[in-house]
């Protein structure tokens, strides 16, 4: 089972959300612990957390037996004035990651509420013109990533963003060009947005090209929506949980992904910024062992 599904890890599993933050575990310790936990495939997370020089990045990864498969970037797509900075940011990430042999770039949509304060910093709902620009720029960014760097861009759904609900996802993937825009199935954020992971896998078998595998506590998610919490507040209230707790049923998700019969990286995540630095290592070992017991093993 799951012969074409490869497990991996990223800094989020170690409580890391930002390139530099005093509440986060130093990158050297996180990387050492990731290798100790049994991972050999990595998505690098916030650009700047790990070294951005490709030679040093590869040296550090090689020393720990780690292989970089993806980079991650935040970039505004729906505002015309933001495009130059988004393009510069993603070109910098792409240049580093192409040089170390990565295959994917994950586009994380900026949230409309501040990650620290929860205050609104953008429109909650995009106008028609802003949504059209989002689609146009997603296609353009994906084309740049593919044509100039040989990388596959995948859009990532996220709580408190303009690609959160099933309706958002359907709208995005009905409008974007599949030659340039793939789908990062984040199983936890799908639950947070009220979606059904199994139905999404069946609905978009050709678009799903990358996976973040994690779970959410449905009771906390429900309260977050009922009381209109920010996503950051929901995380502080332990919305994100380690399997086998929470939803979705990850063994069922693994089985559904396996039925797609194509290679997929499945990157372990658990939103826990900030966290006790003693927590991530044993938690990640338990998570990896649980997933391996259900067919998603280390390769």
Image: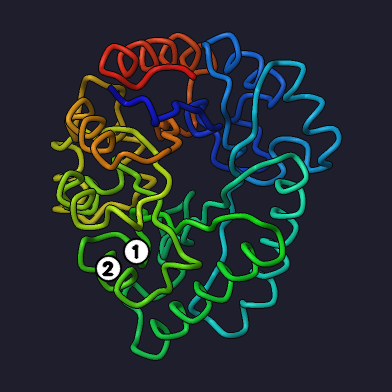
The residue that appears at 34% across and 15% down in the rendered structure is 292
- Return the x and y of residue 188 as percentages of the image width and height: 29, 40
- Check whether the beta carbons of the residues at disc 1 and disc 2 lie within 8 A of each other: yes
Give how far across and how far down residue 107 sits, in percent: 51, 57
Please tell me in which quadrant of the rendered image residue 40 appears: top right
The residue sitting at the bottom extreme is 129
Residue located beneath label 2 in the image: 168
The secondary element bearing badge 2 is classed as helix
- 252 sits left or right of 44 in the view: left
Picture coordinates of residue 156, whole percent (x, y): 42, 54
> Mark 1 falls on what kind of element?
loop
Say few, some or many: other residues with alpha carbon within 10 Å of mark 2 (under 14 / 14 to 19 / 20 or more). some
Q: Residue at x 21, y 25 (%)?
A: 251
Using the image as rendered, state which of residue 161 and residue 298 is in the foreground. Answer: 298
**Which is more N-terminal, label 2 or label 1?**
1
Q: In terms of depth relative to the viewer, which is nearer, 257 or 135?
A: 257
**Residue holding disc 1:** 163
Compared across the picture, whether 287 is left or right of 19 comes to: left
The percent coordinates of residue 265 (x first, y second) are 45, 36
As drawn, 286 above or below 217:
above
Residue 212 position (above or below residue 32): below
Left-right relation of 163 to 181? left
How many neighbours does mark 1 have within 10 angstroms: few (below 14), some (14-19), or many (20 or more)?
many
Mark 1–mark 2 Cα distance, whole angstroms, equals: 5 Å
Determine which of the numbered discs, if any, sits on residue 104 in the image: none
Query: What residue is rendered at 69% in x and 38% in y?
Result: 49
């Amino acid at each position: 089972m799951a012969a074409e599904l490869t497990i991996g890890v990223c800094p989020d599993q170690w409580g890391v959300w930002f390139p530099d933050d005093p509440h986060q575990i130093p990158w050297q310790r996180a990387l050492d612990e990731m290798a100790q936990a049994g991972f050999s495939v990595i998505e690098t997370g916030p650009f700047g957390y790990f070294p951005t020089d490709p030679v040093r990045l590869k040296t550090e990864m090689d020393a720990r037996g780690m292989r970089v498969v993806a980079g991650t970037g935040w970039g505004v797509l729906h505002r015309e004035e933001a495009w130059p900075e988004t393009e510069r940011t993603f070109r910098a990430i792409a240049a580093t990651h192409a040089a170390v042999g990565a295959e994917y770039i994950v586009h994380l949509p900026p949230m409309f509420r501040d990650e620290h304060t929860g205050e609104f910093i953008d429109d909650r709902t995009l106008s028609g013109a802003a949504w059209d620009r989002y689609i146009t720029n997603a296609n353009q960014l994906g084309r740049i990533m593919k044509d100039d760097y040989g990388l596959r861009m995948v859009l990532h759904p996220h709580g408190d963003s303009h690609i959160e609900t099933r309706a958002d996802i359907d709208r995005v993937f009905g409008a974007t060009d599949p030659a340039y825009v793939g789908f990062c199935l984040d199983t936890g954020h799908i639950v947070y947005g009220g979606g059904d992971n199994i139905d999404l896998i069946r609905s978009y078998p050709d678009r799903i090209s990358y996976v973040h595998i994690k779970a959410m506590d449905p009771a906390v998610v429900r309260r977050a929506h009922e009381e209109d919490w920010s996503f950051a507040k929901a995380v502080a209230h332990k919305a994100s949980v380690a399997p086998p707790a929470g939803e979705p049923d990850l063994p069922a998700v693994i089985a559904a992904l396996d039925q797609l019969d194509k290679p997929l990286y499945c990157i372990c995540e658990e939103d826990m910024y900030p966290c006790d630095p003693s927590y991530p290592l044993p938690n990640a070992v338990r998570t990896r062992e649980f997933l391996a017991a259900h067919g998603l093993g280390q390769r």
